[in-house]
Image (cartoon, grey):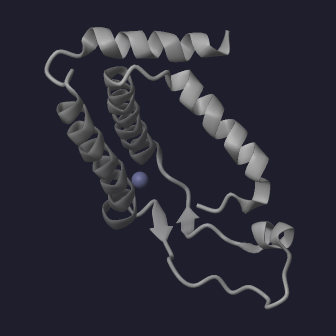
Amino acid sequence: MKDLLCSQFQETVAESLIRHKGMVDAMTKLQESVARVNRAIAKAANQCGCIRIVAEKQKLPEEISLADMQSLIDTDIEGQICENCRDVLETEIGSTLFYLTAVLNAVDLSLYDCLLKEHKRIKALGLFHFS
Ligand SMILES: [Zn+2]
């Protein structure tokens, strides 16, 4: 049942692709869409101002466990994304998912299988999954 949405999405992407059906087009459109996600976040901070990106070195105690570290590390985002920026970001992320799925289709991989595999990997690594 859970893979039904992924399968339907993958089929819809396959049916709607005409111009970007090839791998090179799908790969470059995926790269472009990821850049647009980053741009949407930057615009939320720089133009709208609903969020603030405060990128600085995390100040952590010298002796700290991995479990404690997780609760002490802050995100570098302050504020709450507004409705307009949320809409733009969701659209750009949707486009990214579209082109990612196009890449998967080009090499005959399953979106659901990739999600499942990554989920299992993250769960197995637990706190050691730093990326
Ligand atoms: Zn905003």
Q: From the viewer's perspective, is residue 20 above or below residue 128? A: above
Q: Farthest bottom residue? A: 62
Residue found at x 64% / y 82%: 58
Q: Give x and y (percent) for residue 94.
A: 40, 32
Residue reaching furthest to the left: 19
Residue at x 18% of width, y 32% of height: 25
Left or right of 98 on screen, residue 26: left
Q: What residue appears at the point 84 percent right and 81 percent down from the top-left corner?
A: 64
Examine the rendered structure and indicate whether residue 81 appears above or below residue 120. Answer: below
Q: In this view, does 51 lie above or below 114?
A: below
Q: Which of the 4 image quarters holds residue 42? A: bottom left
Quadrant of image for the C terminus = bottom right
Residue at 32%, 31% in the rendered image: 99
Residue 129 spot, x, y in % from top left:
68, 57
Q: In this view, does 126 lie above or below 2?
A: below
Q: Residue 5 in the image: x percent, y percent?
A: 55, 14
Q: In the image, is 85 to the left or to the right of 36? A: right
